[in-house]
Image (cartoon, rainbow, N blue to C red):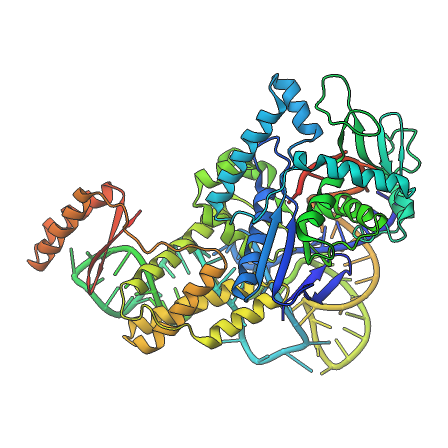
Amino acid sequence: MLQLFDTAKGSVVPFQPREPGKVSMYVCGPTVYGPPHLGHGRFSLVFDVLRRYLRWSGYEVTYVSNITDIDDKIIDRAKREQRDWREIARRCEEVWYRAMDALGVQRPDHDPHATDYVEQMVALVERLVARGAAYETSDGVYFAAETVDDYGLLARQPLETLKAGARVETIEEKRSPVDFALWKKAKPGEPSWPSPWGEGRPGWHTECVVMSLDILGEDFDLHGGGQDLAFPHHENERAQAVADGRRFARTWVHNGFVEVEGTKMSKSLGNVRNLLDLVEQYDPRAYRLLVLQSHYRSPIDVSDANLRAAEGALDRLDAFARRVAASPAAGAEPDPEALEQFRAAMDDDLQTPAATRLLFDLVRQANAALDAGDVAAAGPRAAAALEIASVLGLELSTGEEDVPEEVRAWVRERDEARAARDWARADALRDRITAAGYVVEDTPTGAVLRRA
RNA sequence: GGCGGCGUGACCGAGUGGCUCAGGUAGCGGCCUGCAAAGCCGUUUACACGGGUUCGAUUCCCGUCGCCGCCUCCA
């Protein structure tokens, strides 16, 4: 059975879905005001892997991830660039999905947009005001954090400490420094929606409450995001739901941070903080592998050296996939014991490092068996390795899909030359193929091509 | 000030009170190969420092040093 670290409980607990066989998960998505960065990539990959694993485990998964398409940062950028804020949001959303697609992150089943839920948000804020959990000020409506008994649960700090640590540039009308905006009254020229408190826009923390409950219903299974969202964002979502008398997420899962070695990194390749740059400069799967190789709650350091190493490892996996596909070991049933080990690793709070180790062990074992001509031993291990890779979202390349006909012809010529033991000619042809960007591998069944 | 995390071999990065265990990348040596590629095998005193607990600590406790994150809108 799957065990996950629940931030609210502060420990690893058995994952028990609301409804047997079904999992409802909500993962906080991006605010669309700029290109996605490495942090977005990490949480997307982490929860993509969790989702794929749950599916593979037999759960029917509903995956919701929102798009925050109205926010101060969007408005600021619109002002600065003299553009329409909606256009910025729309463009950024396109870029977001382009990056996600490149990373192999499956699209959410639902991607609610904040602007489609403003009415429901207003209704929630009204209820909170009516219950005395929120109050109006000259610039908006604020949530009174002290009305929630266990406020600070996700921050894992008591309310008093949070208040003591709060930064002081707060509005004087706020009753407590930890209170946060549910509704912001519009200044002239700002996008706005009608409300009982006048024209304005929702605060950030409210949308996720409304959208998650609307789509997934009360007591949904899992709420996820980056560690930095635990407080204040998730804390504040939860506070609203609790004050509204609703049951909120059963389990809270947060992934660790991405660290980019400032100077070193920027020196070697000029600040790859942007996800799009990363997927252009490296095999996009390299980031996924990097994420898999450390535990989701640990920090990861994304550096040129790390990404290159991951690319090297992917070459190995691709070569393996090619070799298996071309061998008689292809198509075997996966070794059940290996899959059991995989399951054990993943069930233990998603120990993807152990899972990837298993993957590489299986690859080595299967390769050795193939070397020895032991198809019976190679098949099940190879199949298990390929299945594990697939569950982790690592799509391996077996193919020489789009090799130009010209290059194929050289390969055929080279095979003939080799058959005639004309090594000089064979080597000349290989040079030509190499120059065209391909690598030839001679196998017992003929030459195999791949991209360099 | 409060809370939390981290410091592992050339590099990255898991993990554990004692049982050669990681794994990946790179280098080197070997096998295989016409030569390669791919693959396999082998390979470099590893666990920040100082104490303590213990028969025994990289793993537990205390301290020191260093790095990092969160504490109102940043995944």
- Judge from the rendering whether residue B46 lies leftward or rightward of residue A372; answer left or right: right
In the rendered image, the residue lying farthest to the left is A420
- Judge from the rendering whether residue A362 lies leftward or rightward of residue A108; answer left or right: left
**Do we see residue A20 in this rendering?**
yes
Q: Quadrant of residue A211?
A: top right
Q: Position of residue A274 (x, y in %)?
A: 55, 36
Q: Position of residue A160 (x, y in %)?
A: 92, 47
Question: Considering the image in quadrants, where does the N terminus of chain A appear?
Answer: bottom right
Q: For this rendering, which residue is in front, A61 or A321?
A: A61
At 55% from the left and 50% from the top, the residue drawn is A45
**Do we see residue A178 in this rendering?**
no
Q: Position of residue A136 (x, y in %)?
A: 89, 31
Q: Position of residue A82 (x, y in %)?
A: 61, 16
Q: Quadrant of residue A71?
A: top right
At 45% from the left and 55% from the top, the residue drawn is A394
Q: For this rendering, which residue is in front, A143 or A11?
A: A143
A39 relative to B49, above or below? above
At 30% from the left and 63% from the top, the residue drawn is A325
- Judge from the rendering whether residue A321 lies leftward or rightward of residue A442; answer left or right: right
Number of labelled discs? 0
A207 relative to A414, above or below? above
At 80% from the left and 50% from the top, the residue drawn is A155
A202 relative to B9, above or below? above
- Judge from the rendering whether residue A5 lies leftward or rightward of residue A407; answer left or right: right
